[in-house]
Image: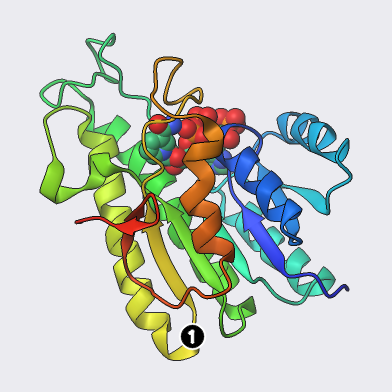
Amino acid sequence: MHSRRIAVVTGANRGLGLETARQLAERGFHVILTSRNPQAGAEALKRLQTQNLPLELRKLDVNSTEDVQALARHIKESHSRVDVLVNNAGILPESSRDAGAKSANPLKVSPVTVMEIFNTNTLGAVRLIQALVPLMPEGARIVNVSSGMGALSDSGGGYLGYRISKAALNMVTRVFAAELAARGILVNSVCPGWVRTDMGGAGASRSIEKGVETIVWLASAPQATESGFFWRDRSKIPW
Ligand SMILES: NC(=O)c1ccc[n+]([C@@H]2O[C@H](COP(=O)([O-])OP(=O)(O)OC[C@H]3O[C@@H](n4cnc5c(N)ncnc54)[C@H](OP(=O)(O)O)[C@@H]3O)[C@@H](O)[C@H]2O)c1
């Protein structure tokens, strides 16, 4: 048991999740860095521990109810609360190079692929919220890492599964923001922009540091009180 605030980050072994974990730890949170692959998580943790940051690793596949429940039990026993949940884990298997089941073409992509994306990107966040909200005090924050590709107001063609999953994740934000308002728990969606991670690719316009800026701000800024919005670069954007 310790006095630091507790933050949970999903998909934190690489990309935006890893950098979010690092920056929250730098800001004084005790960060529970979660990874579905324990080996990848251990390697990520090792890199961060050279900075002597307050971090611990837990195995978490956001599609596994058992993993989610085990995480909630561990946190309840060891820390007794959660102050920040960053739902970052996500997949984008659809590709313009695939002419089959994982095609970016909405006329070709398999509904099975669409379901898999929805399960991870949307229901993954729901599983974590349902399990961890009972441990959240007033003032806790939930940050759902969404995407402009899920904005109804700004949608092009292509990437049907990914777009559906992020539009639905934005509705998850709205529903839980309303549901948890009376408890003072803030729930927001964020678009990190197009970021140079494995998902975004080397040609993306933003660094990882820039990509996590608004995620970390929503999770940790002391003056934040707004809930139920969609953010990019610390400004609200249309759904
Ligand atoms: N990069 C961009 O341009 C961009 C733009 C808009 C939104 N986003 C969103 O930002 C978030 C992070 O993306 P990123 O760019 O950092 O992608 P990334 O480098 O591909 O990392 C994705 C992370 O999610 C994890 N993950 C995937 N499925 C999981 C599961 N079932 N359980 C637990 N972890 C799982 C991955 O774990 P493994 O290593 O085990 O695969 C990895 O740690 C995603 O939600 C993405 O949709 C990214």
Q: Is residue 135 above or below residue 171?
A: below
Left or right: residue 3 compared with residue 126: right
In the image, farthest residue toward the bottom: 182
Q: Can residue 107 be seen at all in this image of the molecule? A: yes
* Residue 173 x %, y %: 35, 65
State left or right for residue 14 relative to residue 105.
right
Q: Quadrant of the C terminus?
A: bottom left
In front here: 70 or 201?
Answer: 201
Q: Secondary structure at mark 1?
A: loop
* Quadrant of the rendering where the N terminus is positioned: bottom right
Residue toward you, 99 or 214: 214
Which residue appears at 42% of the width and 91% of the height?
Answer: 182
Return the x and y of residue 121 as percentages of the image width and height.
Answer: 40, 45
- Among the 4 quarters of the image, the one containing residue 194: top left
Horizontally, residue 73 falls left or right of residue 229, namely right
Tell me what residue is drawn at x 50 percent, y 26 percent: 197
User: What is the image's colouring?
Assistant: rainbow
Which residue is pictured at 44% across the width and 61% down the height?
A: 126
Q: Tag 1: Cα neighbours inside 10 Å, few (<14), some, or many (≥20)?
A: some
Residue that carries the numbered disc 1 in the rendered image: 184
Image vertical order of residue 196 relative to residue 52, above or below: above
Q: Position of residue 138 (x, y in %)?
A: 57, 85
Residue 23 or residue 148, whichever sits in front: 23
